[in-house]
Image: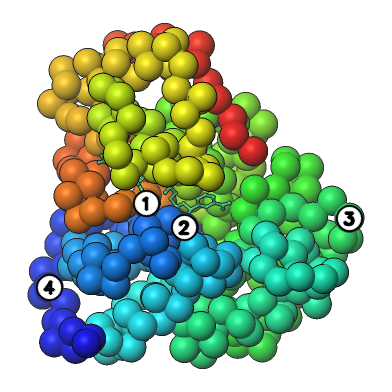
Amino acid sequence: MFDTSYTAAPGRYEAMPYRRCGASGVLIPAVSLGLWQNFGTDAPMERIREIAHFAFDRGICHFDLANNYGPLPGAAEENFGRLLQDSFKPYRDELFISSKAGYLMWPGPYGEWGSRKYLMASLDQSLKRMKLDYVDLFYTHRFDPVTPIEETMQALVDIVRQGKALYVGVSRYPDAAAKKAYDYLRESKTPCLLFQDRYNIIDRWPEKDGLLDMARDNGSGFISFSPLQQGLLTSRYLDGVPAGSRMSRSGTSLPEKILTPTLLEALRGLNDLAQQRGQTLAQMSLSWLLADPRVTSVLVGASSVAQLKENLGALENIHFTEEELAAIERLSLPVQIHQH
Ligand SMILES: NC(=O)c1ccc[n+]([C@@H]2O[C@H](COP(=O)([O-])OP(=O)(O)OC[C@H]3O[C@@H](n4cnc5c(N)ncnc54)[C@H](OP(=O)(O)O)[C@@H]3O)[C@@H](O)[C@H]2O)c1
């Protein structure tokens, strides 16, 4: 049974700040919701609906998907399609929905990477799964070192011309390829709206390789995925690995070996600092990202409403003293991890 009685909260836009994606006309919420995990066949539809409704009621109008999000690949888009039908249909024009293609979706030579053949077919499949005419933003999900970058970028440009996406984005491209992508898209009058990469207190890669500055300098927004490093930058693992957590699940994207005693000690130090600021570790981690004007939005995941509610508390204080910033550097720089 679908809950067709959903009505969005009237005050949903009151508390959420909206930030401009680079030099574009588009504003997105400071906190966005990603459906990589917890929205596929691993979760009951009731919980999916509960989290999504809560998000939208609090002004999170940007939902991030990809062809392969599940499990099973495609399941998150299918479930989001159900949500659109049973709850969000009247609100389509209030939603900013993104999808991507790049990772393995179907067998054979056309089921992954960056060819025109794959990107065009994959977006058509995504639109069918979500029962949408268009997505707001379509990303190339990862850099393809073999396909000419011009082919991938021209496919994105043509997708916009076909009306299947309003804007285009680039995810996980190394710096030299990102520069070429920005240039091609700008020259084609379809500028990159958002660059999406992992960035958080313990993964500073986009700082080091200049991707944050490059996004800003090219008039693109930057959206930080896994801003909580999949839950490490929360209280989740401070006292062991709880049953049901991402780390506890087999075949996980967050292997237990990552949680070394040195990392745990640093996380505990960060947690103490957060408490001194009157925040939880999750909140401080998101606030730290949002304090940087180069970061347009933090793209969080959540397995419960309680987590999302806690995380939205980050918006209450995104100011840091010099001492706090220095303490974060001192605690986190020695334990940097970069998961590819
Ligand atoms: N472009 C790309 O290649 C790429 C790659 C990865 C992700 N993404 C995007 O980024 C989104 C977010 O990624 P992510 O899920 O890794 O983000 P994340 O926010 O770093 O991690 C989310 C996970 O952390 C835990 N968590 C969140 N808030 C918590 C809290 N307050 N207290 C305790 N635990 C908390 C939950 O894990 P439990 O399950 O343990 O509860 C939750 O599922 C994805 O959905 C996707 O849209 C993009």
Q: Which residue is mark 3?
A: 146
**Image quarter of the C terminus:** top right
Q: Position of residue 2 (x, y in %)?
A: 23, 86
Q: Residue at x 74, y 52 (%)?
A: 143
Q: Residue at x 51, y 78 (%)?
A: 135
Mark 1 touches mark 2? (CB < 8 Å): yes
Seen in the picture, residue 132 relative to 335 is either above or below; the reply is: below
Residue nearest the viewer, comparing 195 with 189: 195
**Quick one: label 1 or label 4, which is nearer the N terminus?**
4
Mark seen at residue 36: 2
Residue nearest the viewer, comparing 175 with 103: 103
- Does mark 1's beta carbon lie closer than 8 Å to ligand 1? yes
| SS type, badge 3 | loop
Residue nearest the viewer, comparing 105 with 20: 105
| SS type, badge 1 | loop
Determine crowd level at label 2: few under 14, some 14-19, many 20+ residues with C-alpha closer than 10 A. many
CA separation, marks 1 and 2? 7 Å
**Quick one: label 3 or label 4, which is nearer the N terminus?**
4
Q: Which residue is mark 4?
A: 9
Q: Amino acid at mark 1?
A: Gly
